[in-house]
Image (cartoon, grey):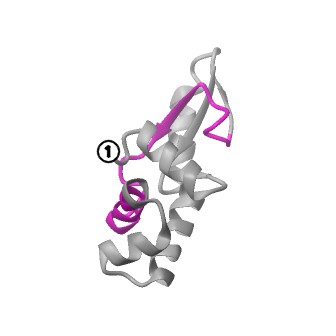
């Protein structure tokens, strides 16, 4: 089974991988989209990043998110960029889909 681990710090990632490495059936991958299972730190994203991802899933565009969350487009883009990096997503759509799938946003 391929497992991806997403956590706030590399120390957390290393510790989780150490615990899971006791099983011979587990291998690790960096791409959560290619993993059979993903372990996600519930505090991986900031509240602002979660809010912007949720708003993007509801409204569909950066402009709408900015208007509905009372943030500038630049701030929305900054939060989306940060969330994409943390979730290892290539696009905003991937980040939203992954966050929904993992229960980071609802």
Of 87 and 12, which appears nearest the observer?
87
Of 13 and 32, which appears nearest the observer?
32
The residue at the point 45 percent across, 42 percent down is: 40
Of 1 and 81, which appears nearest the observer?
81
The residue at the point 51 percent across, 57 percent down is: 9
Q: Is residue 10 in view?
A: no
**Region in magenta:** 30-55
Q: Position of residue 49 (x, y in %)?
A: 41, 64
Secondary element type, mark 1: loop
Q: Position of residue 11 (x, y in %)?
A: 53, 52
The residue at the point 56 percent across, 34 percent down is: 18
Q: Quadrant of residue 84?
A: bottom right
Of 8 and 37, which appears nearest the observer?
37
Q: Position of residue 86 (x, y in %)?
A: 54, 57
Q: Position of residue 77 (x, y in %)?
A: 52, 74
> Would residue 55 appear left or right of 10 to someone viewing this image?
left
The residue at the point 32 percent across, 45 percent down is: 106
Q: How many marks?
A: 1
**Quadrant of the snapshot with the N terminus:** top right
Answer whether residue 95 is magenta in the image: no
Dot 1 corresponds to which residue? 106
Q: Residues within 10 Å of mark 1 (few under 14, many from 20)?
A: few
Picture layout, residue 71 above or below residue 88? below
Q: Is residue 35 in view?
A: yes
Answer whether residue 36 is magenta in the image: yes
């Amino acid at each position: 089974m391929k497992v991806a681990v997403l956590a706030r710090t590399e120390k957390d990632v290393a510790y989780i991988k150490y615990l899971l490495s006791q099983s011979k059936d587990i291998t690790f991958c960096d791409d959560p989209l290619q993993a059979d299972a993903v372990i996600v730190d519930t505090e991986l994203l900031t509240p602002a990043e979660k809010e912007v991802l949720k708003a993007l899933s509801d409204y569909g565009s950066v402009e709408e998110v900015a208007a509905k969350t009372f943030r500038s487009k630049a701030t929305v883009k900054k939060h989306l960029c940060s969330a994409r990096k943390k979730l290892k997503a290539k696009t905003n759509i991937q980040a939203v889909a992954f966050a929904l799938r993992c229960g980071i946003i609802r």
